[in-house]
Image (tube, rainbow, N blue to C red):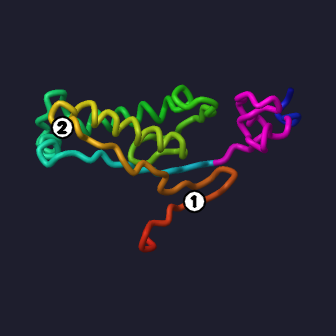
Amino acid sequence: MSAGDAPPPGAGGLTHVDAQGAASMVDVGAKPVTARAARARGAALMSREALAAVRDNAIKKGDVLGVARVAGIMAAKRTADLVPLCHQLPLANVGVELTVEMEAIVAVSVALITVYDMVKAVDPAVTITDVCLVEKTGGRRGTYRRSEPGGGA
């Protein structure tokens, strides 16, 4: 079946479900190539002691923020391997600025998981929270900016 002959969405209009209700990858072959950009954020809540150790680069496993940054970049590059039915997209740049929304969310999540892994010996109660898409441009739906309580973005 060619991209132009793609069947309509499956059960209940869901795009990743075929007519029989089975998981199915969406055919994006006919979609136009567009430039995209996205930002995501999250937080790892930890004790003052653990935060001080991170800031002072005193965690036995090494430079928490540096390793987490690399983990986030690696996660963004491997999003299609981590998220079922997610299409692999070529990334032009991964770092402080990420190129697509799923990659941004995955990068933030894996970076925070890395922070947890490296800090858990000092503070096993570290909590990962508030992972969300902040802003996205491009793609079929265009621009999205998260509205925050109080009107900020």
Q: Position of residue 33 (x, y in %)?
A: 69, 43
Residue at 15% across / 35% down in the picture?
122
Q: Given the current orientation, which residue lies at the most extreme right position?
A: 5
Determine the secondary structure under disc 1.
strand
Query: Is 26 part of what is drawn in magenta?
Result: yes
| Quadrant of residue 6 within the rendered picture | top right
Circle nearer the viewer, 1 or 2: 2
Q: In the displayed structure, would residue 147 be above or below residue 27?
A: below
* Mark 2 residue crowding within 10 angstroms, few (<14) / some (14–19) / many (20+): some
Q: Nearer the viewer, residue 47 or 84?
A: 47
Residue 123 numbered tag:
2
Residue type at tag 1: Tyr
Q: CA distance from mark 1 to mark 2?
A: 36 Å
Residue at 44% across / 40% down in the picture?
94
Q: Nearer the viewer, residue 117 or 61?
A: 117
Boundaries of the magenta span: 7-34
Residue 144 numbered tag:
1
Q: In the displayed structure, would residue 61 be above or below residue 49?
A: above
Q: Is residue 108 left or right of residue 143?
A: left
Residue at 74% across / 44% down in the picture?
32
Q: Given the current orientation, which residue lies at the most extreme bottom position?
A: 150
Q: Position of residue 93 (x, y in %)?
A: 47, 41
Q: Position of residue 67 (x, y in %)?
A: 28, 33
Residue type at tag 2: Asp
Q: Is residue 59 left or right of residue 153?
A: left
Circle 1/circle 2 CB separation < 8 Å: no
* Mark 1 residue crowding within 10 angstroms, few (<14) / some (14–19) / many (20+): few
Q: In the displayed structure, would residue 124 be above or below residue 40?
A: above
